[in-house]
Amino acid sequence: MTFLPLGFTAPLMLAALLLLPVIWWLLRLIPPSPRRVAFPPARLLADIDKREETPDNSPWWLTLLRLLLAAAIILALAGPIWRPLAEAPSGRGPLWILLDNGWASSAGWQTRQRGAERLIETAADSGRPVLLAATAEGADQPLVPQNARVALERLRVLEPRPWPVNRGELTPGLTAAAQETRPGAVVWLAEDAADAGTPRFIEGLRALVGDTELTVMTGLGRPTVLADARNDIEALTVSVLADAPSSAPRTIRALDMRGLTLGETVARFGEDGVSGSAEFDFPVELRNDVARLELVGEDSAAGVQLLDDRWQRRTVGLVSGASADQAQPLLSPLYYLERALSPFAELRRPREENLAVALPDLIEQGVSVIILADVGRLPEEAQASVAAWVEQGGVLLRFAGPRMAGGTDDLVPTSLRAGDRTLGGSLSWEQPQPLANFSEGSPFARLPVPADVTVNRQVLAEPGPDLSDRTWASLADGTPLVTAAARGRGTLVLFHVTADTAWSNLPLSGAFVSMLRRIVAVSSASGSRAENGAGTAAGGRLQEPAEVLLPPVRVLDGFGRLGPPPASALPISARGGEVAASRRHPPGLYGSDDAFRAINLFTAPGQVLPLDLAGLGGSARVVTYPTSEATDLRPLLFLAALLLLFADAIAMMALRGDRNGLRARLARGATVLLLAGLAAAALPHASLAQETSDDLAALEATLDTRLAYVVTGQPDRDVTSRQGLLGLSRYLASRTALEPEAPVGVDIARDELAFFPILYWPITEDTPVPSSDALARIDAYMRNGGTILFDTADQLAAGISGFGTSPAVLRLRQVLDGLDIPPLEPVPADHVLTKAFYLLETFPGRYADGPLWVEATDAQNSADRPVRAGDGVSPLLITGNDFAAAWAVDEAGNPLFPTVPNDAMQREYAYRSGVNIVMYALTGNYKADQVHVPALLERLGQ
């Protein structure tokens, strides 16, 4: 029953309005309660005249008030509905209801469902059968006319699906139903989104309908879509596609696996107001914890993006074996690694140069991969920490170089051919070697091999029966380029070339980036490896598993809630490509609870297609859903009845004369005297730093430049070192602009070494071998740019690998065995040390015949470059010429020891050697920049 835009769910209750006259008569018949007067003095009551003053009927306004109360209750019980839903179209024969229940139907689903329910109820009242077809359910549903009550039960269990509709699947079934019995009317409750089969469905529907009335209801819009989530370098980004421009902000929330909120952000839209994006600028550790992105207030599968291990940004730690001052752009191996890895990995550099501290610190930061560029030997503590980390699933990637050519530790995938410190262990060819094709068992399989990549130097692996199984990449002549081996749950990988362009041009190619990307992918957690069904064999070659299927674990429903999968959901292949969401593969998580793969409804905003009804032509009546929902007026009427009841009670109190109601009374001076003064914040006390001896020593070392020597614990040798550096400091002050203060002795196990540019370390047969902690401090000092001058004082005349048999040399070898030192060579004639201040050909001390050993450098373009040097200062110098004894003087400036042979010019050249060494340690290779001096002199005519 409907009056204008007003309907009633129980119209028979309106008959009770006929009782209003009877209620009026009863109200007139029954007067209100008499007025009561309370007056205690009983003796005065006799003097009061007894007169009847109570009215014999109710006032007219009170009667009207009560009649309105009764009418409000009757109307409320009749169930009034404002703007009820439209009725079914006219016509005879079965009523077809085509209901879209795909992902876009979640917007206004209750309106769609109530509209279909009203249509079915009206058809039931007229005895018409109903064919109900849900377009997201496929052909596995009864596409025949049914009793309206049966169709109503089916409708009530329908819900939005999290996949796109497939309307084209219904065309054969609807064609068969139309051939059996033509429909009397067709109503299509459409969602504002299309699929690939929609044009074919519209064409078939137009042919089926013919002259039958066809009504298409649309206009409820579609949900806002999230797609294309990307964990970029700076932030986690997701694309947002709205249905229409809106001034209301759209908030996106990030949640972890436990459903806890990690953060929220507001989407930013472009000029069209429809397409935009949202960014979460979390730290990478927090971004890797994000498992779900969702639109706040948008209950739809389209507003959800599920993230699995593929969206996690791997954290890679980078460590270089080069000293700090060699780390220059285009010359540092880390430069090429950073450029290659930064697009897909989060890079971490250690805060400490001490590897014993830096590597455990990187492990504590949760890195997935640690890359060591030309680190030959790790300290024992760091080696143990890294080995345990690899055993637990980490990937250690190492690059060769001069330091590794001289020896390495056990954390390499294969044994390397032994070599000396002068690059004797590296292989050089007359013709550079190209890369061979990658084998199928390698992670680099099916990568294109660049023809322009060549290798001119590499460290060689020891031949063995399992070397081929450990080889991931090789050169054209069959020698390994990349080897790998499993270690526990982790992997050891070695590039047999440097990470820069010194040994090959591989870092300049795109293949280098692709190879690193594949290796970083191997660093996935164990769950990801279980997901892919692949692992690293003991030999290092990837195991190719059989086909692995990932069953659905939890899937999204149409409102974006995770729940158990339906029976129709099928597993997906672990090795397959991107899987599109469908009825057989709903969006959700596939695999297991701890190793899963996520399938999302949309991977790109361009996959959202609008609904185009132009194919229907003029055969359909396209209407919009009601702009406003049907409003139930019963709550308003019951509220009005309650207010009228309160008004009636107040009126009755007024008629009885009860005026001692609420009277406003002021509180009796509630005096709050609790003026609790805020306790003044305690004034900060300036705490004065206690000046300890360590603080004073550090202050003295930083305020002035000082030369330092290592305290050996041998009084005679320590005195010689102190007096020798004192004599050299005086010579520096008299001949150069440097005026160093008095030298100091340092304890390498306790004192801070970074204050001193150079350390003089005398080595004797009684020198104790430093502890592993002290060796780690020394290694960090040299990596930070410090230089150590080792002096055995025994006329050292052999190479670093052939010291001879003197006790001091043997002890020096024991000390150096625990350090990661580069290959060494005698100072070449064109080295910077020969021209740092004085022009020198030899570096004598108390003895004159021993050479001075420095870090070996490549002699390239020596004809065009008059001064040859490395890109920094050699971290260590070795001599046996006893420099300190040649420099040593007493307080009066007299030499303490004679030279051998006793020659004043030899002592002068010893001082000049010391000046060049100090200038070299302080200024580096600035003299190597004199490459243009000959041209300038020629231009000046000199």
Image (spheres, rainbow, N blue to C red):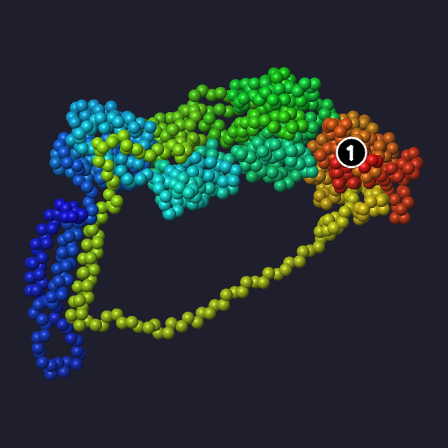
Residue located 17% across and 34% down the image: 149
Q: Is 24 above or below relative to 902?
A: below
Tell me residue 347's x, y (percent): 57, 36
- Secondary structure of residue under mark 1: helix
Q: Look at 20% across and 28% down and name the residue there.
A: 209
> Which image quadrant: the C terminus?
top right
Q: Nearer the viewer, residue 322 or 111?
A: 111
Is 407 placed left or right of 270 in the picture?
A: right
Give the quadrant of residue 222: top left
Quadrant of residue 294 in the image? top left
User: Is 426 left, or right, of 847 in this rendering?
Assistant: left
Determine whether 475 is above or below 191 in the image. Answer: above
Q: Which residue lies at the image location 85% right of the left edge and 46% below the top edge?
A: 734
Location of residue 434 in the rendering, given as x and y in whole percent from the top left corner: 62, 19
Toward the viewer: 283 or 145?
A: 145
- Is residue 390 visible in the rendered structure shown here? no
**Dot 1 corresponds to which residue?**
935
Picture layout, residue 768 above or below residue 805: below
**Looking at the rendering, in which quadrant would you find the N terminus?**
top left
Disc 1 packing (10 Å; few <14; some 14–19; many ≥20): few
**For the residue marked with disc 1, what is the amino acid?**
Ala
- Residue 447 appears left or right of 722: left
On the image, the x and y values in percent for residue 609 come to: 35, 33
Residue closer to the observer: 874 or 745: 874
Residue at figure coordinates x 76%, y 34% from the top left: 932
Tell me residue 608's x, y (percent).
Answer: 36, 34
